[in-house]
Amino acid sequence: MGTYCLGLGDSIRFSADHAGLPVQQLKTLGLDADDRRDANLVNFPVISLEPGPLKRWAKVTVGVPDVRVSGISIDRTQVSLRPAEDSTKQDDAPPPR
């Protein structure tokens, strides 16, 4: 298991005016104009695998107005892209038989 960086991000909301927009072109509420132009920010939806949130995400992807989905904005410069070390791994343990 790796370490996740959701706690390093800022909460945002996504919405769309028309269908078929990639995540990068969705409206992002919760970011100011300077942040929207910041190339180091990565925005992505955070959706639980339950019917209600998935239904809202489906509505955003087809461009239903006035529907919003939660998301997160993370600054790439604040996150290590290297995988975390597995704390359960023991280098001194004998190989399995």
Image (cartoon, helix red, strand yellow):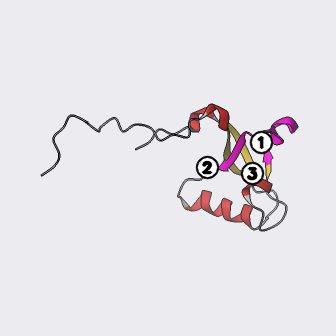
Secondary structure type for disc 3: strand
Q: Residues within 10 Å of mark 2 (few under 14, many from 20)?
A: some
Residue type, mark 2 in image: Val
Separation of disc 2 and disc 3 at Cα? 10 Å
Residue that label 1 marks: 39
Q: Residues within 10 Å of mark 3 (few under 14, many from 20)?
A: many
Of callouts 1 and 2, which one flags the residue occurring earlier in the amino acid sequence?
A: 1
Q: Which mark is residue 46?
A: 2
Residue 18 in the image, given as x and y percentages of width and height: 83, 65
Residue drawn at x 44%, y 42% is: 2
Q: Is residue 33 magenta?
A: yes
Residue 17 in the image, given as x and y percentages of width and height: 85, 61
Separation of disc 3 and disc 1 at Cα? 18 Å
Residue that label 3 marks: 14
Separation of disc 1 and disc 2 at Cα? 20 Å
Q: Which region is colored magenta?
A: 28-45
Direction from residue 6 to residue 19 in the image, left or right:
right
Residue type, mark 3 in image: Phe
